[in-house]
Amino acid sequence: MLCLCAAGLAWMLVVPGRVIGGEAAPAPTPAPDTAAEAGAPSEATAPSEDEAPPAAVPGQRITEQGEVIAAEEVEEPDLAELPLSNAARVRLDSARDSVVLVRGFFGAAATSAFHGTGFVVGNEGFIVTNYHVVSEAVLHPRRYRLEYVTSDGRRGRLRVYAVDVRNDLAVVKPEQQLDLPALRLRTDIPRAGARAYSIGYPLNLGLTITEGVANGLVASGFDQRIHYTGAINSGMSGGPALDAGGTVYGVNVSVISGRQLVGFVVPARHIVPLLRRAHAPLDEGRTPGQLRAMVAQQAQAYETVVLGPWDTESAGRVDTTQQILGFRLPTRIGPSFECSTTGSSDAPQGLEAETISCTGRSGVLLLLDLEVGHVGFQHRVLRAPRLAPLQFAQRVNDIAGSHRRQGSAQHVAAFACKDALVSLDGFEARITTCARQYRLFSGLYDLAVTVASISSDERAVITQLDLRGVGFEAGMQFVRRFLGAMQWNP
């Protein structure tokens, strides 16, 4: 991570393997050119590998071989040859005036309830940020207000003009015109391994830049995300992700918790269509209920990708099912699903178990603490050769009944459940299907399904399937397709 504050203030640079901090230091004084005094080669001689290349005149570049070429012939600026801190400083200084702090306040409170980052694009004064940064103000416009703070301390009110819930993007605009420079956008994806930068306001530490590598689009995912190897800390959401030339290639969006330097960036190509929809403030002529319905509709459009027919071909050569003790069970049902298998033995209880856990890389943030569009499931295959049939049945019932159905009562109603005995492919099963509706988002439901086989006295499968924030009919179609893929061939 590189954290660089304004000139004259305390600064800190953190790069792999070293930490540098202190007060802003003056530029180093160059050492005397003793080599020239000792009769070293003249300026016409090509520089050695340890010497910096001579400075080019405006409009020209000098290659490593000393050849002078036109600047437009260079694919990227020559920042790759600069030390890490210098390159980051150049990018931060160039973008500083275009990046703003975005803050949200509850009612008339003087302290902020949440904050993120935004940056200016285009010539109409629009600011791009993440949807989740401004989601409270979108869904509760009468409770929350938004404010910007520029790098030179100016502040004012913001209004939301357009949102893209699936790609976690929003377009906002100051109520009063700001004379801030816009950042350039590129709609292509940087090549994997290209140097990249992320800018934002993390944890009230001031404007910060981190340096890393853009690793191209994530190969397996429901959405387009660029993998960024660099720090994206809380508060940097919505900030610009820059290439080596200072052009915005994406928007900071998320980081995987518990995994160092694994961040994701929304490609800038999604900004352009969103700007076309930014005609007027969203709360102009819309009630809070209509705003929530608009957000729910965007979330339900996302579910067609997550809950649609299984893309078995794109899943690769890995089988979409796995067989254990005669049970064939759906596992990697698409390229965006990750699965793991563990084993355990509970000797006192006489049980042996293999557990397969699978999760789809999906999810849309409707609020900071509310993610929908999630799919996850777990299979537990049990074997108990030393237990009596009634003892084994009791253990299966206990495990099946322990399915934890989580969710905040603030967002969802209580579950309503229904039990049924169902004939699946090769075995009988007791199935419990539970559903609950979202309070603010009409048409969205959580579905929790538990399957317990009852056809054998010494082996069984217990499957728990969870769908969060999906349409009821689309969710039930997925459940039926999932159950139809379960088989037992003793």
Image (cartoon, rainbow, N blue to C red):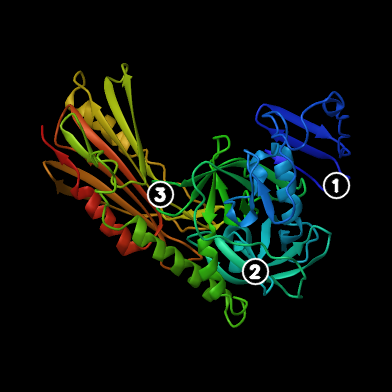
* Residue drawn at 77 percent across, 71 percent down: 178
Q: Position of residue 130 (x, y in %)?
A: 59, 59
Q: Earlier in the sequence, mark 1 or mark 3?
A: 1
* Residue drawn at 61 percent across, 76 percent down: 283
Q: Secondary structure at mark 2?
A: strand
- Residue farthest to the bottom? 285
Residue 172 marker? 2
In front: 395, or 429?
Answer: 429
Q: Position of residue 189 (x, y in %)?
A: 49, 53
* Residue drawn at 24 percent across, 47 percent down: 431
Which numbered disc, 2 or 1, marks the residue closer to the eye?
Answer: 1
Q: Secondary structure at mark 3?
A: loop
Marks 2,1: beta carbons within 8 A: no
Residue 54 falls left or right of residue 460: right
Q: Circle 1 sits on which residue?
A: 7
Q: Residues within 10 Å of mark 2 (few under 14, many from 20)?
A: many
Residue type pointed to by label 2:
Val
Q: Circle 3 sits on which residue?
A: 221
Seen in the picture, residue 54 relative to 248 is either above or below; the reply is above
* Residue drawn at 76 percent across, 48 percent down: 204
Q: Quadrant of the C terminus?
A: top left
